[in-house]
Amino acid sequence: MGFVDRVLRPEDVRVAARNLRELTAKSPTFLPAHLRLALKVGATTSLLAPGLTIPAARRLLRRMVSHLLIDASDVELAKMIAKIKRRGARLNINLLGEAVLGDKEAKGRIEGTENLLMRDDVDYVSIKVSSAVAPHAPLAFDQAVEHIQASLLPLFRLAAESTTPKFINLDMEEYRDLDLTTAVFTELLDREDLLHLEAGIVLQAYLPDALGAMIRLQNWAAARRSRGGAAIKVRLVKGANLPMERVEASLHGWPLATWDTKQETDTNYKRVLNYALTTERVANVRIGVAGHNLFDIAYAWTLAGRRGVRHGVEFEMLLGMAEGQARAVAETVGPLLLYVPAVHPRDFDVAIAHLVRRLQEGASPDNFISAVFDLHDSPALYERERSRFVASPAGLDDTVPAPNRTQDRREIARLDQQIRLDIVPTSFDNTPDTDPSLAGNRLWSQAITERIASSTLGDDLVAAHTITERSVLEATIRDTLAAGASWAELGARGRAKILRRAAIIFAQRRGELLEAMASECAKRWTRAIPKCQKLSISSTTTPVRPRS
Ligand SMILES: Cc1cc2nc3c(=O)[nH]c(=O)nc-3n(C[C@H](O)[C@H](O)[C@H](O)COP(=O)(O)OP(=O)(O)OC[C@H]3O[C@@H](n4cnc5c(N)ncnc54)[C@H](O)[C@@H]3O)c2cc1C
């Protein structure tokens, strides 16, 4: 990682050269002797000729990871595609690139993927919705769906109009992309001009939401087929963004979107397979079994065999991961579909996220891949994976798991039950942020947005509380002063109770507060929501240690 951050990334080769020398001095012992020697030579020559040494060092790193991703520049790409195809695999290419922060990058990524799909030697590409457009306001769901569809439409049209079959898959990344990707996918494929196109989407079994999402896709695909449309494909994975989901949940005070344990994820993977692998269902939704866990691959292969639906299942792996095992699997299941990240040398540093993820998967004992090379020789590791596998179907049942994230700002009545006024909190918990991934919250915000232009909420409130007569004003001041004394007499516990009650009211009136802030002060949504959060946080959860 140090090499990537400090030698690969700096634009100035002299900065990179200085970093290279510093890193080499620490002599990373995990590297083989010949690479340590190469680093030492590089560090010495970088003093005199950084302009030669650093590009050479960068080329070396690219070569070291060239089994995991391929060079997207035209000439190299053709060679690599031909090489992988000679091994008997099919390729699903994903063009990596700069994080999409604006329209220019989004356009570049779409054009790059279009160029890939236009090639004669490419028939399958993957892209995620977050790289199709610039980041959008999280609550502006419908606008985002429309925008992403417009951006992806030329790509889908290209596939639909191609004389040879071309396949586009929408990858899945974070939980917040689940509804968005599904909406973009189904709305695009509902278009008459795309009715005959078969395309794919990904579901992540580490989300309890996966089976519900699969059922919805199945029902939708059946309806599309009954209109004469093509089937679709769902790639079933376990999910690669667990650390990110954990960070997101802790930052916003939301429940973790994923299952808590690996075993629950493994069970859910089988739950979705069990649902999906029937003759009737694979006719509408083919399944991509994507992963490296040999037990699960064997399970899926056996289940599909018993149910006579092997024609509806495709096995997918990542390029360069456990290649010996991949070859062995291919001998039984037939040609694999290999997921192949492609990156232009000038963008190589953006491939790091992909490489780090692979590294992390290989290093975590929770993951099968961490044992894959020693499974044969280590009875302990074999037993670890065997017992995980044996345990996972134990939790299988017919239920459709409910999502972990259920916040709905429309359910204001529930707030009264959630906060017990008779219990004084002894610890601090933030009020959770509004979760834009959830449909209920999006509808709630949409309803507020619609009221803003003609809102008179603030005016009405001011009118109702404006004091025009001197006598009323004086009485109000007198009452307020008197209330100050009784407020002090309440003691900490009594005051806490009232403040917490006030917080509940603030939280219940969150929508109205937002409406007034936006209509009167033109407060932007993203600025107004945190303000409301603060109002309800400060009184619901401030730790109160009663003194009386
Ligand atoms: C061809 C291909 C395409 C892929 N595309 C995508 C994609 O579009 N989106 C995506 O997110 N991933 C994708 N992945 C990655 C995939 O989600 C898994 O991360 C990876 O395959 C490892 O899972 P496994 O079944 O091979 O191994 P296993 O070792 O059996 O499973 C590891 C997985 O278990 C889950 N897990 C581990 N610990 C815990 C825990 N404590 N709690 C809950 N769950 C846990 C995680 O999902 C972890 O990745 C893809 C993988 C392949 C092979």
Image (cartoon, grey):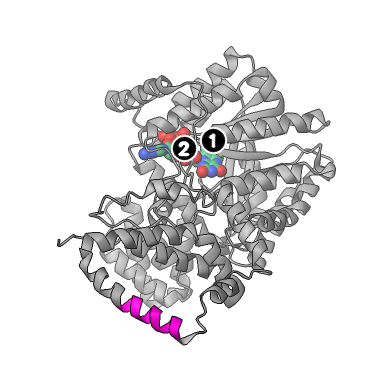
Residue 374 image position (x, y, % from top left): 34, 31
Quadrant where the C terminus is found in the figure: bottom left
The CB of the residue at mark 2 lies under 8 Å from ligand 1: yes
Residue 99, relative to residue 158: is it above or below? below
Q: Position of residue 306 (x, y in %)?
A: 58, 12
Q: Label 2, on which residue?
A: 206
Residue at x 67% of width, y 24% of height = 282
Residue stretch in magenta:
471-481
Q: Report helix, strand or loop for mark 1.
A: helix
Name the amino acid, label 2. Tyr
Q: In this view of the protein, can residue 437 be seen by the observer?
A: yes
- Residue 321 appears anywhere in the view: no
Q: Amino acid at mark 1?
A: Ala
Q: Residues within 10 Å of mark 2 (few under 14, many from 20)?
A: many
Q: Is residue 156 left or right of residue 433?
A: right
Q: What residue is disc 1 on?
A: 210
- Does residue 82 appear to the left or right of 411 in the view shown? right
Figure quadrant of residue 481: bottom left
Which label was assigned to residue 219? none
Q: Residue lying farthest left? A: 548
Q: Quadrant of residue 57?
A: bottom left
Q: Quadrant of the N terminus?
A: bottom left
Kindly state the secondary structure of the residue where label 2 is placed.
Answer: loop
Horizontal and vertical percent for residue 188?
75, 46
